[in-house]
Amino acid sequence: MDYAIETISLTKIFSDWWGRAKVYAVDDLNLKIRPNEVFGLLGPNGSGKTTTIKMLLGLLHPTKGHALLLGGQGADPKINTRIGFLPEESYLYRFLNARETLDFYGRLFGLTPDVRKMRIEALLEMVGLKAVARRPVGTYSKGMARRIGLAQALINDPDLLILDEPTTGLDPIGTRQIKDLILKLAERGKTILLCSHLLADVEDVCDRISILYGGKVQSEGRVGDLLRQADKRQITTGAISEKALAKIQKILNEEGVGCDVTSPMEKLETFFIDTVVEAQQQAKPTSGAVSTTDIGEFLTAEESQGSILDRLASTSEPELAPTGDLKTEEVEPVEVATPQGNQDLLSDLVKPDSGSETEQVDSTAAADLAAPKGPKPTEVPDVKKNVLDALMGGDATPDATTSAPQEPKKDGESGDG
């Protein structure tokens, strides 16, 4: 597999009512994203980014061309089980809490209960939602919903992660956390496709970018190569005296170039995060998400021989002992006495009562003769009750003190004694 994602003349045309070509959402797109690369897909609204992602995942059929993900089709179950996807909007079940949501998606991927439990706790800790894991997702803020959405995209430990606006609605700490997570996942061999309107975030994490407009690629390359200003130089020094600064300016004037001398400024994002981290170290209470830089161990590809991934692979299904090792105890068969066949018993049960008492007595006597010898239950006047007892398996030997052998009745004797 040379490329994790490859599109060949990928095109999507949305037609009007009469079937005429109306909008070229994606026009002859050719992308080649290498494994273990963070690739940024950029562009203004309506440039075709989301349409491209949907075609990659098989949610939309291209008008022409085709796309390959991890060497196969995105709609192939064997392929999409290796893909994690965070859509632009978090489509979650609002009445499930965070643990139930992650457990639901873990079941969809066929994860065992032990694996689901381990990964759920690790992901909740990673995205900072462990303290509010029992709250329904419908009560979460947009930023918290994005956090749980990212966790569900990682529940299957994907090889390819597709993130569509992952930092939308997140606070600066959450944004920084997502960026750090992307960098750590890339270090561990994951391939990441990132779509975002926040260009500063893309600049911080992406190796290469592609800028779309009108469904076509307008510019593509490495971030450093595209942003570098080759006709300018930048020098950063420590604090120097005014005399040394004057000498530098004199040298630059001799070169025929001007210069602006200013003090460097810290990024507002860095200042904001440092302030909040200081408050967290003082154990200030908060009801929101908690920032963390820890990454789940199951997402780590480079571990020792006893890594979690190795243990998961070796204990995915319990092994049965070989047939030859099984020991069975011989159990003697138990003979169950049945006075008559079930069919005969049912016939006697439904037989009308028009017959004489003598015929009923003879039937009972024949049943008693067919039964094995031994103590019998106390005589019951109603013949049909004997039949029901026989159907229900009432062959248990009664107490010897309360039972007596029943003598067959002689011809001509009355059933009333």
Image: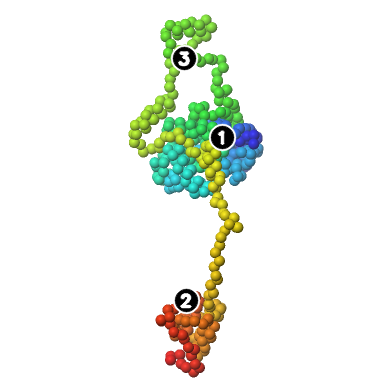
Q: Which residue is drawn at 43% across and 26% down?
A: 270
Amino acid type at image mark 1: Gly
Q: Locate residue 251, reporting x and y percent.
A: 50, 6
Which SS class for mark 3?
loop
Which comes before the other along the chain, label 1 or label 2?
1
Name which quarter of the figure residue 321 lies in: bottom right
Residue 189, labelled with which disc?
Answer: 1
Question: Foreground: 64 or 367?
Answer: 367
Q: Residue 64 vs residue 154: left or right?
A: right
- Distance (Cα) linking label 3 and label 1: 36 Å
Q: Locate residue 51, reporting x and y percent.
A: 57, 37
Amino acid type at image mark 2: Ala
Residue contact at pointers 1 and 2, CB within 8 angstroms: no
Q: Locate residue 186, reporting x and y percent.
A: 54, 33
Which residue is disc 3 drawn over?
A: 237
Q: Residue 252 vs residue 6: left or right?
A: left
Question: Foreground: 222 or 279?
Answer: 279
Counting every numbered tag in the picture gives: 3
Question: Foreground: 146 or 216?
Answer: 146
Q: Residue 369 vs residue 1: left or right?
A: left
| Mark 3 nearby-residue class (10 Å; few <14, some 14–19, many ≥20) | few
- Distance (Cα) linking label 1 and label 2: 70 Å
| Mark 2 nearby-residue class (10 Å; few <14, some 14–19, many ≥20) | few
Q: Which residue is drawn at 40% across and 37% down?
A: 289
Instruction: Work out which quarter of the rendered image holds the N terminus and state it.
Output: top right
Between circles 3 and 2, the one closer to the viewer is 2
